[in-house]
Amino acid sequence: MSTTSNTAKLNLIDQNINLPVVIGTEGEQAVDISKLRSDSGFITLDDGYGNTGSCQSNICFIDGEKGILRYRGIPIDQLAQYSSFIETAMLLINGQLPNSQQLNDFHNLLIQHQMLHEGLHNHFSGFPTNAHPMAILSAMINACSCYHPDIMDMEDEATFESAAARLLSKIRTIAAAAYAMSIGKPTVYPKPNLNYCENFLHMMFSMPHQDFDPPEELVQALNLIFILHAEHEQNCSTSTVRMVASSGANLFASCSAGVCALWGWRHGGANVAVLNMLQDINDNKTPYRDYMECVKKKEVKLMGFGHRVYKNFDPRATILKESCDKVLALLGVKDPLLDLARGLEEVALSDSYFKDRKLYPNVDFYSGILLRAMGIPIDMFTVMFAMGRMPGWIAHWKEVRDNPNIRINRPRQIYTGPTNRDFVPIEERP
């Protein structure tokens, strides 16, 4: 980042304000308005923050017009092809890909911290059996911090690395235990000899009397899903993590808030909305071409197509589509919803109405299909997203913590309520 000698000149009624111009490393341009209110009395208004840069960050770069996504400068397609989820996590958190020793040391930390304190298992029994896994995940992440008070005081890199490994490792154990509780199945403990994705699938689908040995294609598909979801700049949940972190909150509390933000159907729940749409089409026996005609008439919503940031094809969707086709073929999955999804995709990619509006299938469309084919229950879809996004949240929390000039985030507002009025005693109110 650099501040140029150029300034933007803003004419405000009877004032002329000079605002610094800031240039990012990829040529992104911004007008620095941090002193606008003190210099002029004005603030800016930007509902949804679509045109507001909330911070400077060196973690992720997106060019929505060109369909570019890079983690710490490395293109997402290279990470998807060559990296493991844990390598990618270390890249995001530390800024560089690990060498063999660093990767091995972090893997050992994950093994060290994969078990939950036995006291935490009592908390699961306190939730109703129909509790949503995202509610359990958020609550249990916070509960974890109660059993590890050392995370409240992370003054050096060693303590931070341990806390990061603890959170990354325990989130999969919590997620699998939440699923087991929801179906009345005993909790399955993690195994130290399995890699990250294998261990999660083992805990999800094993029974006390029979271990689940996940096929390699499932392990690779899960690894890919996690990598593609690991980071995505200043989205709703990541911004939430940064907002909470700016208050000085610990890593676990900040990431627990990120889980809550991710839960919404406009964000992490988008792939659930895709499956619900497909289920409705199937239940109503609506031909997929007829449904797409209804979309054109704005009679129904099309979930899983288009993206707020990408004005081109979502690069993650391109990668996931290839994996989706491969995994479905290898698993021999026969599912009417998957056939419907392929039909909608075919129409969207060939119809000028959708192409002109850049309504291409996005990552949520393919991730929902793939997770369903893998046997992941629909209530767990957003949990999978949270597990994948955790490295990005941790990286952003660290970036906030390490910023010597950080201030608590505190947006302004334009008040539109009643003007000054007097209190009316209850006996005089209409």
Image (tube, rainbow, N blue to C red):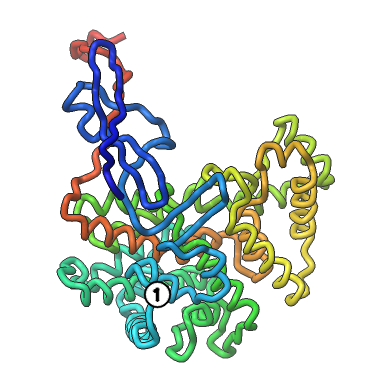
> Horizontally, is 421 left or right of 114 in the view?
left
Depth check: give the residue in front, 169 or 393: 393
Q: Measured along the vertical axis of the image, is residue 26 above or below residue 42? A: below
Instruction: Tell me the residue at 53%/87% (across/down).
Output: 208
Location of residue 392 by image quarter:
bottom left
Q: Which residue is denoted by mark 1 in the rendering?
A: 97
Q: What residue is shown at x 37% (from left), y 37% (from top)? A: 52
Measured as percent of width and height from the top left, residue 63 is found at 50, 49
Q: Is residue 62 left or right of residue 320?
A: left
Amino acid type shown at disc 1: Leu
Circle 1: element type: loop
Q: Is residue 37 above or below residue 201?
A: above
Q: Position of residue 232 (x, y in %)?
A: 46, 55
Q: How many marks?
A: 1
For this orientation, the residue located farthest to the front is 5
Q: Along the horizontal axis of the image, is 279 left or right of 225? A: right
Measuring from the top left, give residue 253's x and y in whole percent: 28, 59
Q: Is 202 or 360 nearer to us in this picture?
A: 360
Query: Residue at (73%, 36%) from the top-left corner?
Result: 295
Residue 173: name its quadrant: bottom left
The residue shown at (51%, 73%) is 180
Q: Please state which of residues 234 and 276 is positioned toward the viewer in this rendering.
A: 234
